[in-house]
Image (cartoon, rainbow, N blue to C red):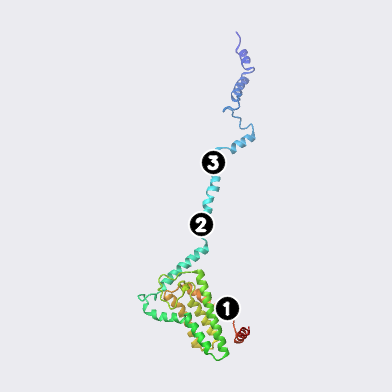
Amino acid sequence: MPSPKAKNPARGGGSPVHGTSFEFMSLTKPLNRSSPLHLPRQGSDPTTARLRASESPTRRRGSNSSTASGSGMGAPEEDGIRLNPSLIRVALSSLLAIDLWMSKSLGVCAWEDSSWGSVRPLMKLIEVSGHGIPWLAGTVYCLYKSDSAAGQEVMLNLLIGLLLDLILVGIVKAVVRRRRPAHNRMDMFATYSVDRFSFPSGHATRAAMCGRFLLVHLVLAAPLRVLVLVWVLLVGMSRVLLGRHHVTDVLFGFWMGYFQYNIVEMLWLSTQTLQELLGQTVLN
């Protein structure tokens, strides 16, 4: 009867340990490598281990989340920044709202039944004093009646300044085309097509330009100089109290009229120059 030791070498070709190891290796190494049982050892190939680690579900989830946070979350943030209004636009909108509120609150003489409706006739009288037609007619009359060359020179350049004021104000109104306040009553004296627009105030530009012109070129006593300044301020105030203009229309009109005088000074025309021009025109 053969011993048990004689059967083991025939079955495994060696010791029992080697036989057991051979059977385990045969199970873990199938001949068909396309089979799903083909699972190589993790420690056998470092490159394969690194690739497997990079393709793991955890890494894929992390990469997808990072991609989503980089592309999906970045676009709404950029759109939100792009849709936010700029600081300048916010400031201009705030100033416009304040301007509309102040203009409506100060229009206390716009109608007879307003809170200061009893002062409306006086405000309309001040309005007429700053109108362009009385100033043009008065300047032409003084130019015609003046006997001195110096007086004629002053009146001639004042006439040029008044004409320049009408042209510049008409151009700005036609370009800006800002409507007058909603509480305004269109009963103004001698209005024209551009007078339906509000920006800037022609009365304010004319008052500022003429006031500065009179203070510089006319010898006036101190009370009269104060009276000229008071008249300029009253003309500007009447535009807002009557509801004709917004506050910014008057403020810009004062600024524009102040610098219009600088243009008149640059274009100053003396009587001698005028006579030379007239003489050349007659000769030609």
Q: Residues within 10 Å of mark 2 (few under 14, many from 20)?
A: few
Q: Amino acid at mark 1?
A: Ile
The earlier-in-sequence mark between 2 and 1 is: 2
Residue 253: percent from left, percent from top: 50, 75
Q: Which residue is mark 3?
A: 61
Per the image, label 1 sits on a secondary structure element best described as helix
Residue at x 59%, y 37% (from the top left corner): 53
Q: Nearer the viewer, mark 2 or mark 1?
A: 1
Q: Residues within 10 Å of mark 3 (few under 14, many from 20)?
A: few
Per the image, label 2 sits on a secondary structure element best described as helix
- Report the front residue among 57 and 152: 152
Name above or below for residue 272 compared with residue 37: below
Residue at x 51%, y 85% (from the top left corner): 140
Q: Residues within 10 Å of mark 1 (few under 14, many from 20)?
A: few
Q: In the image, which disc is placed on residue 76?
A: none
Outermost residue toward the left in this view: 113
- Answer whether labels 1 and 3 touch (C-beta < 8 Å): no
**Count of numbered badges drawn on the protein:** 3
Q: Which residue is mark 1?
A: 263
Quadrant for the C terminus in the image: bottom right
Q: Which residue is mark 2?
A: 83
- Report the front residue among 238 and 172: 172
Residue 142: percent from left, percent from top: 51, 87
The earlier-in-sequence mark between 3 and 2 is: 3
Q: Quadrant of residue 39?
A: top right
- Report the front residue among 254 and 263: 263
Q: Nearer the viewer, mark 3 or mark 2?
A: 2
Q: Amino acid at mark 3?
A: Arg
Outermost residue toward the top in this view: 1
The earlier-in-sequence mark between 1 and 3 is: 3
Outermost residue toward the front in this view: 284
Outermost residue toward the bottom in this view: 147
